[in-house]
C-alpha cells in the first residue's frame, strides 16, 4: 500500500506494533517440550487480548494463527500437537495481525535451547541479509537493488535463497503488489514510490535452494532436508529513509 494519509500510517504502525508484541510473546514461550499447537493457541489468545485479529487464521483456508516452521520447514508449518520442540531445533514463527483494517506481518527464527554453530550462523546471516537489503532500498531506486543485496549477502556465506516465495506489499490486504523477491538483478523490479509499505522476508536455506510442498497443502520443506531460516519485517519507505515497523 502507498499511504495517502497520515492516519493510514498511524493505523499501520499500530498493527505492526501488535505484530511485534505477538512475536516477543511467542519467543518467551519457546522451550524444549512445548508443542507447536500449544504455541499457536497461546499466540492466538494473546493477539486477541491485545485488541488485534490474527490475520492468518482462515486466510485461504489456513487453519492457525501463526506459521510455525521447525528445522527443514522453510515456511507455513501448520501448528500440531505432535510437533514438539526439542533442544537443538530452530523454529521460525511468522505472525500477522489485523488492526482496524490494516495488516502487520513479521517473522523470526529462534533457537530452542543450545543449537549448533552452523544453525546459529544461518539465523544470523538470514537476519543480517534483511538489513543489508534495506540499506539498498530508496525512493526512486529499483526494488532489485534490495533484492540483489539480500542474495549477494546470503550467498557469500554459502547459503541459498528460496525463489518460489517472496515478500510483498502490505496494507489493507496482507498481500499486495509489488512482489518483493530476495534475489535478482539490481535493475529488476519497480521504481520504489514514496510512503510504500512492504513486508521484506528473506527465506534462506543452509544447503540448496530447492523446496517442496507437503501433502497438507501448506508445509514447505527444503529438498535436501537441511535447515532454513526466515526473518521478516513490515517496513515503511519514505523520502527520509526506511522505517522498520515490527522491530
Ligand atoms: N506471513 C506469510 C507471508 O509473509 C503469510 C502466511 S500465509 C497464511 O506471506 F496463510 F498463513 F496466512
Ligand atoms: Co509476509
Image: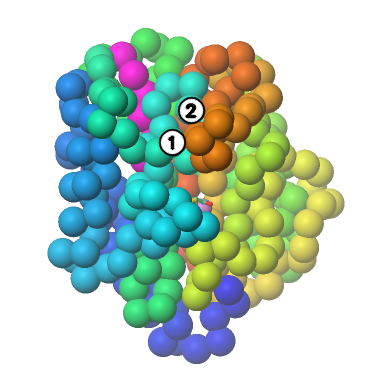
CA–CA distance between discs 2 and 1?
A: 6 Å
- Is the residue under label 1 in contact with that under label 2 (CB below 8 Å)? yes
Residue at image point 36% right, 24% down = 90
- Residue designated by label 2: 73
Foreground pick, 132 / 120: 120
Helix, strand or loop for disc 1: loop
Foreground pick, 90 / 238: 90
Q: Is residue 220 left or right of residue 56?
A: right
Q: Is residue 110 left or right of residue 198?
A: left
Overall secondary structure of the magenta section: strand
- Residue designated by label 1: 77
Residue 92 is drawn in which quadrant? top left
Residue 14, relative to residue 37: is it above or below? below
Start-end of magenta stretch: 88-93
Residue 169, relative to residue 208: is it above or below? below
- Crowdedness of circle 1 by 10 Å Cα count: few (<14), some, many (20+)? many
Residue at image point 31% right, 67% down = 53
Q: According to the image, what is the colour scheme of the structure? A: rainbow
Evaluate whether residue 227 shows in this view.
yes
- Crowdedness of circle 2 by 10 Å Cα count: few (<14), some, many (20+)? many
Q: Residue furthest front?
A: 215
Residue at image point 56% right, 19% down = 206
Q: Position of residue 229 (x, y in %)?
A: 48, 30
Q: Position of residue 15 (x, y in %)?
A: 35, 68
Q: Is mark 2 within 8 Å of ligand 1?
A: no
Q: Is residue 122 magenta?
A: no
Q: Is residue 153 left or right of residue 230?
A: right
Q: Position of residue 16 (x, y in %)?
A: 37, 64
Residue 232, relative to residue 36: is it above or below? below
Helix, strand or loop for disc 2: strand
Amino acid at each position: 500500500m502507498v499511504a495517502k494519509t497520515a492516519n493510514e500510517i498511524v493505523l499501520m504502525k499500530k498493527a505492526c506494533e501488535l505484530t511485534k508484541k505477538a512475536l516477543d510473546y511467542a519467543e518467551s514461550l519457546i522451550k524444549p517440550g512445548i508443542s507447536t499447537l500449544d504455541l499457536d493457541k497461546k499466540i492466538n489468545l494473546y493477539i486477541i487480548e491485545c485488541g488485534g485479529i490474527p490475520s492468518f487464521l482462515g486466510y485461504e483456508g489456513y487453519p492457525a494463527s501463526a506459521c510455525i516452521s521447525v528445522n527443514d520447514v522453510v515456511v507455513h508449518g501448520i501448528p500440531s500437537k505432535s510437533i514438539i520442540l526439542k533442544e537443538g531445533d530452530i523454529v521460525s514463527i511468522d505472525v500477522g495481525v489485523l488492526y482496524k483494517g490494516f495488516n502487520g506481518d513479521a517473522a523470526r527464527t529462534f533457537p530452542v535451547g543450545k543449537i549448533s554453530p552452523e544453525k546459529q550462523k544461518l539465523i544470523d546471516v538470514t537476519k543480517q541479509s534483511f538489513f543489508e537489503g534495506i540499506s539498498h532500498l530508496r525512493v526512486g531506486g529499483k526494488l532489485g537493488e534490495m533484492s540483489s543485496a539480500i542474495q549477494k549477502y546470503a550467498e557469500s556465506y554459502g547459503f541459498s535463497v528460496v525463489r518460489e516465495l517472496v515478500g510483498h506489499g502490505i496494507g489493507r490486504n496482507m498481500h499486495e503488489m509489488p512482489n518483493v523477491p530476495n534475489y535478482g538483478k539490481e535493475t529488476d523490479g519497480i521504481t520504489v514510490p514514496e510512503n510504500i509499505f512492504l513486508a521484506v522476508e528473506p527465506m534462506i536455506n543452509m544447503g540448496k535452494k530447492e523446496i517442496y510442498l507437503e501433502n497438507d497443502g501448506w508445509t514447505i520443506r527444503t529438498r535436501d532436508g537441511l535447515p532454513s531460516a526466515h526473518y521478516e519485517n513490515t517496513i515503511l519507505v519514505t523520502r527520509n529513509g526506511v522505517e522498520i515497523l515490527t522491530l
